Image (cartoon, coloured by chain):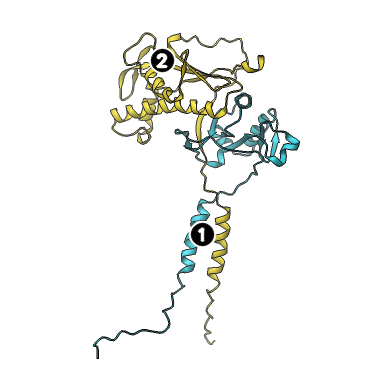
């Protein structure tokens, strides 16, 4: 049988085809990546008669946001720009101030016996509070925790928190446990 | 007579277009990989809160279900008014629909993935907290505790 030469396939149209595809994907692409603030809700409690565990007043840092989006931090008018610093100071309690949270000595891997603060951050908002303000307050509190964790990670391991091994992260989380309590919102504006 | 005579050709040399498909293909692959096809059409005005420094990238998009909250877009305002509404998938919904929605989202996924399901709240920044609180209570009842407040850095 005679060998026949296979005719060459023209590649001239390939550029056109790929252009077409390119334009399709260009149009269909949306570059925005989903990002957001991760939070965990407390499980639903059916029985409201069960009393929540008692927490000493000195261990609680209260942030109230009213319907006019004003902040009341620990009973005083507050500014969102200072909130992060205040929360950090409250969690750390460097001078063992009696108005700031108690500390409990706990045995923690990598650290040995370490005083762990018994803090709770309580956020309460009104039903008419603006969502953006609420989220900014949440963000500041989470940021305060993250900064503390990062500082400790740098001091102890010399690496940022994000780059630690899981068990090292776990140890630091035990020292600075994130306890943000959200009370049921009040409805002051409607009662008028 | 100069030793080196510069040759000036009358027509400029042709640029080879042989590598053009390769370049275009490279671009295609880039866009194919980065493309996210939008699956839901937004019926609400959504302006996400900005400058949230601690917001993290959402991993594993297949494990995320979305709840949109915001003022209806102008073309829907005649029917639905201007108060913030909830949108689940493609339709407006009531607060009481959320539990059913979560159950449906769970049924659509393998059982092993259920504990890792996250609910992403895509809420317009001017919405009042009242509706968000109601949603949060519904999510607690449905035991969907992992939530994510969608926001930009």
Residue pictured at 49% horizontal, 40% vertical: B59
In the image, is residue A185 above or below residue B115?
above
Are the residues under marks 2 and 1 on the same chain?
no
**Residue under label 2:** A118
Of B54 and A67, the residue lying toward us: A67
Residue B56 at least partly seen: yes
**Residue under label 1:** B28
Quadrant in the picture for the C terminus of chain A: top right
Query: Residue A174 at what x, y percent from top left?
Result: 39, 22
Residue A187 at least partly seen: no
Q: CA distance from mark 2 to mark 1?
A: 54 Å
Chain B drawing hue: cyan
In the image, is residue B40 above or below residue B11?
above
Is residue A13 found left or right of B42 in the rendered image? left
Mark 1, chain letter? B
Query: Residue A36 at what x, y percent from top left?
Result: 51, 35
Of B80 and A104, the residue lying toward us: B80
Of A44 and B15, the residue lying toward us: B15
Q: Report crowding for label 1: few under 14, some 14 to 19, many 20 or more residues within 10 A (C-alpha).
A: many
Helix, strand or loop at mark 2: loop
Instruction: In the displayed orientation, state which residue is furthest to the right.
Output: B79
Quarter of the view holding residue A176: top left
Shown in yellow, the chain is: A
Residue pictured at 69% horizontal, 40% vertical: B74
Query: Residue A118 at what x, y percent from top left?
Result: 41, 15
In the image, is residue B93 above or below residue A112?
below
Mark 2, chain letter? A
Q: Report crowding for label 2: few under 14, some 14 to 19, many 20 or more residues within 10 A (C-alpha).
A: many
Instruction: In the displayed orientation, state which residue is furthest to the front.
Output: B1
């Amino acid at each position: 049988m005679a060998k026949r030469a296979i005719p060459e396939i023209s590649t001239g149209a390939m550029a056109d085809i790929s252009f077409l595809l390119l334009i399709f994907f260009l149009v269909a692409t949306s570059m925005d990546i989903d990002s957001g603030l991760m939070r965990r809700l407390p499980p639903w409690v059916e029985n409201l008669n069960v009393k929540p565990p008692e927490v000493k007043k000195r261990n609680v840092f209260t942030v109230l946001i009213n319907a006019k989006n004003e902040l009341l931090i620990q009973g005083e008018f507050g500014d969102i720009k200072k909130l992060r610093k205040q929360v950090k100071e409250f969690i750390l309690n460097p001078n063992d101030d009696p108005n700031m949270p108690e500390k409990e000595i706990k045995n923690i891997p990598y650290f040995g016996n370490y005083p762990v603060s018994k803090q709770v951050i309580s956020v309460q908002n009104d039903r008419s509070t603006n969502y953006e303000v609420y989220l900014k307050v949440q963000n500041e509190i989470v940021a305060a925790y993250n900064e503390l964790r990062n500082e400790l990670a740098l001091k102890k391991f010399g690496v940022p928190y994000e780059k630690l091994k899981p068990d090292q992260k776990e140890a630091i989380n035990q020292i600075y446990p994130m306890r943000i309590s959200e009370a049921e919102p009040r409805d002051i504006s409607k009662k008028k | 007579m100069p030793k080196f005579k510069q040759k000036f050709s009358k027509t400029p040399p042709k640029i080879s277009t042989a590598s053009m498909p390769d370049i275009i293909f490279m671009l295609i692959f880039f866009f194919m990989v980065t493309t996210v096809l939008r699956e839901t059409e937004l019926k609400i005005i959504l302006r996400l809160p900005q400058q949230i420094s601690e917001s993290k990238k959402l991993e594993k998009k297949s494990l995320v279900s979305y709840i949109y909250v915001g003022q209806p877009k102008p073309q829907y305002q005649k029917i639905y008014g201007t108060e913030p509404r909830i949108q689940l998938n493609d339709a407006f919904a009531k607060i009481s629909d959320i539990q059913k929605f979560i159950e449906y989202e769970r049924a659509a996924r393998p059982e092993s993935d259920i504990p890792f399901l996250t609910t992403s709240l895509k809420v317009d920044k001017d919405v009042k907290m009242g509706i968000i609180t109601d949603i949060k209570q519904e999510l607690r009842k449905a035991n969907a505790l992992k939530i994510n407040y969608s926001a930009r850095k």
